[in-house]
Amino acid sequence: MKTDIVIIGGGPSGLLLSQLLNRAGVATVVLERASRAHVLSRIRAGVLEAGTVRMLREAGAGDRMDREGIPHDGCIFSDDDLMVRVDFRDLTGTGVMVYGQTEVTADLYAAQDAMGATILHEVADVAIHDADTDAPYVTFTQDGAPRRIDCAYIAGCDGFHGVSRKTIPADKRQEFERVYPFGWLGLLSRTPPAHAELIYANSRNGFALASMRNPMLSRYYVQVPLTERVEDWPDDRFWDKLKSCLPAEVAATLVTGPSVEKSIAPLRSFVCEPLRWGRLFLVGDAAHIVPPTGAKGLNLAVSDVYYLHEALIAAIRRGDTAGIDAYSARALARIWKAMRFSWSMTMMLHRFDGEDSFAAQMRKATLLHLSQSETARRDLAENYIGLPF
């Protein structure tokens, strides 16, 4: 096979990149190790920045999002019973969209199918060859048969554990990482949300997040040690823990119900530099991981796609390589700003093992400052709704 761009990874970043490139007349082949059903079964984040919403619309994959997504003009931060609302619309002129990543992925699949894009599922043994030359290619097996695709460029959208980042020689990349000593235990339930807007709760009993996917599908999280196991958390224990972290007035009206899905996500901050090696480019989780506290994971991948799709179109259609030469630096400048925001949110809202009483007072002081300072709320709002691409 031969194509312009091989995209490794059929998650939302790979599909969005393929969609934008194909609409511009640039041919792609997407390689995904899992089945489509498995990809669509993954439960992921659901807060879309204004820039992500705009990109999905421009890609021709935003119609259902506009019909079914829930626009949010603000969110709540709490410290025990102190509740502080940050009004995104008033402070920045725009808001965010609550729409599940699973739904985004389904919409992108539908858009790709409509244009006849090539997506190969259940491929194995993916290997990248000669990425540092002018003639890169990718080999893999499908249905037990070896296959090869020759291409002009390769986009690694295959996540933290994928082959793309590991293809870059260790002496050609630098990795920065912070692993946090706790995770988020998440529960999905077919119940009405605890509040009309997201609640980020700091409390004497730890962190919790009250979120939603739609008016009858709620997503909740509580902070747990990394040693915890999902099977040790029956639904009743989870609901009791959640109520103990939320403000009393919210906990009193919380509607509980059987869990649809339950899982524990560890928290880490990770960045790999550079995002380019020859004709191989890293995108999304292949290059960086952020704690979910700032709702930046998918959104940061979309900003990578924004920079890369423009660069690849210029290189393929016009022979202009200025964009691909600048891709890593442009994307990393925004990545590190998002890293800072996600790190600061994580520090502001979570209890750390072994911390002293001073740390708890600092969290309280931060929330109190947020409640009294419009400047502080504006800074948070600008970062939450997404910095410009």
Image (cartoon, rainbow, N blue to C red):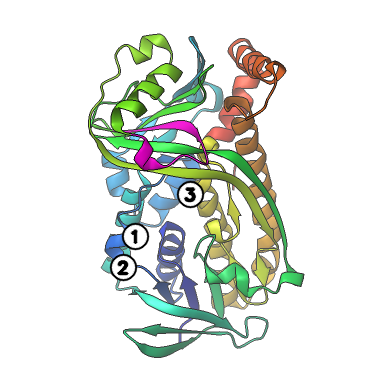
Residue 310 in the image: above or below residue 135:
above
Mark 2 Cα-neighbour bin, 10 Å: few <14, some 14–19, many ≥20: some
Counting residues from the N terminus, which is met first, the one under dot 1 or under dot 3? 1
The label number, if any, that marks residue 35 in the structure image: 2
**Could you tell me which residue is drawn at 43 percent across and 13 percent down?**
247
Q: Is residue 301 left or right of residue 115?
A: right
Quarter that holds the N terminus: bottom left
Find the residue positioned furthest to the right: 171
Q: Would you say the residues marked 2 and 1 are in contact, meaning their CB atoms lie under 8 Å apart? A: yes
Residue 148, image x, y percentages: 46, 89
Q: Mark 2 against mark 3, which lies toward the viewer?
A: 2
Q: Is residue 230 magenta?
A: yes
Q: In which quadrant of the rendered view does residue 67 lie?
A: top left
Image position of 110 (left or right of 350): left
Residue where numbered disc 3 is placed: 298
Total labels drawn:
3
Where in the figure is residue 362, as x and y percent of width and height? 68, 18
| Cα gap from disc 2 to disc 1, whole angstroms | 6 Å
Magenta stretch in the rendered image: 218-233
Secondary structure of the residue carrying numbered label 2: loop
Residue designated by label 1: 39
Question: On the rendered structure, is 244 left or right of 215?
Answer: right
- Which amino acid, mark 3? Leu
